[in-house]
Structures are given as C-alpha cells and as structure tokens.
Image (cartoon, rainbow, N blue to C red):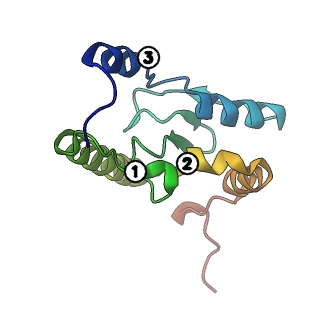
Amino acid sequence: MVDTRTPEQRRRIMQSVKTKDTGPEQAVRKALFAAGYRFRLHRRDLPGSPDIVFPGRKKAIFVHGCFWHGHDCPKGRGSKSRTDYWGPKVEANKARDTRSIAELESLGWKPLTVWQCELKDPDALMTRLLTFLNEPEISIDKAPADR
C-alpha cells in the first residue's frame, strides 16, 4: 500500500513521536502515584532504561506502545506501507526488549511490561500493577532453612 502522506507530512509526524514521557507512560505513572507509590524514571544505568523503577524492590516497569513493540493486539498490527522498513524495525525492537528483560533478570531485577492497549481497562491494569509490586521477593539468602 502506498503511503497516504507526503514525505514532509510523514517526517513531521515521526518527529513528534516521543520515546519518554509518552501518554501511556504518564497514565501508568499517575495511577501508581495516586496509589501512594514513589518511583524513579528512566534509569539509564539499568538495561533497557526502564520507564518506571522501584529501586528498593528491585522492580522495573516498561510501558510499551503496541505498534512500536509488536504487541499481538489490534493496535500492534504492522504498517501496510513501507513494510520493508517497519517489519525489521519492529522485530529489532522486540529483540532488544527481550535482551533488556533477560539482562535485568540476570541482575536480580523483576521486570513487568505494560502494553498501551491495557490502558483501556484501568481497574484490571491497576490490579496487575499492585499484584506485581506487592508480591513478596524470594531470594536464596532469605529462603527458609531446610529442616
């Protein structure tokens, strides 16, 4: 399919897309803050620079746009134009996300990915976030001794 925008229009649209402080990210942050949680943002010293970080809990949240990260939902469908560009671009994003999560886990962090489409149901999303943040940490050092 041919792009319906002129190259100049497409350039302006793409330049306006942010990587930090996106609408979905701000919605998740606002909900967490209202629930009494305090956090850090975009820790560049952690793999993948998670969007929301809880250092004391060693938990990190990535807020992903469905299109940009290739989610399996209606918003995550690939572009019909310039498939030779967008296909590899989204696949590279997915590979980077997988690497970042594996690296975080290897450092003892627990990551969570929140998808843009999950914002449609704020109650379910908040339940998921609270479950993630309140689940007890299990570490080898703190495991009960065998008897």
State the image coordinates of residue 8 (x, y, percent, origin top left): 29, 13
Say what secondary structure mark 3 lies in.
loop
Residue at point 19%, 39% (across, down): 85
Amino acid at dot 1: Ile
Mark 2 or 1: the one toward you = 2
Mark 1 or 3: the one toward you = 3
State the image coordinates of residue 65 (x, y, percent, origin top left): 49, 40
Q: Which mark is residue 39?
A: none
Q: Residue furthest bottom?
A: 147
Q: Which mark is residue 16?
A: 3
Relative to the observer, which residue lies in front, 11 or 41? 11
Quadrant for the N terminus, please: top left
Which residue is identified by label 1?
101
Between discs 1 and 3, the one toward the N terminus: 3
Between discs 2 and 3, the one toward the N terminus: 3
Which residue is identified by label 2?
115
Residue at point 69%, 33% (across, down): 27
Q: Residue furthest right?
A: 35
- The answer to whether residue 42 is above or below residue 117 is above
Amino acid at dot 3: Ser
Q: CA distance from mark 2 to mark 3?
A: 20 Å
Quadrant for the C terminus, please: bottom right
Q: Residue furthest left?
A: 84
Structural crowding at the residue carrying mark 2, measured as other residues with C-alpha within 10 Å and reported as few (<14), some (14–19) or many (≥20): many
State the image coordinates of residue 96 (x, y, percent, origin top left): 29, 45
Confirm whether residue 56 shows in the render: yes
Relative side of 80 to 23, left or right: left
Relative side of 62 to 101, left or right: right
Residue at point 31%, 17% (across, down): 11
Structural crowding at the residue carrying mark 3, measured as other residues with C-alpha within 10 Å and reported as few (<14), some (14–19) or many (≥20): few
- The answer to whether residue 15 is above or below residue 98 is above
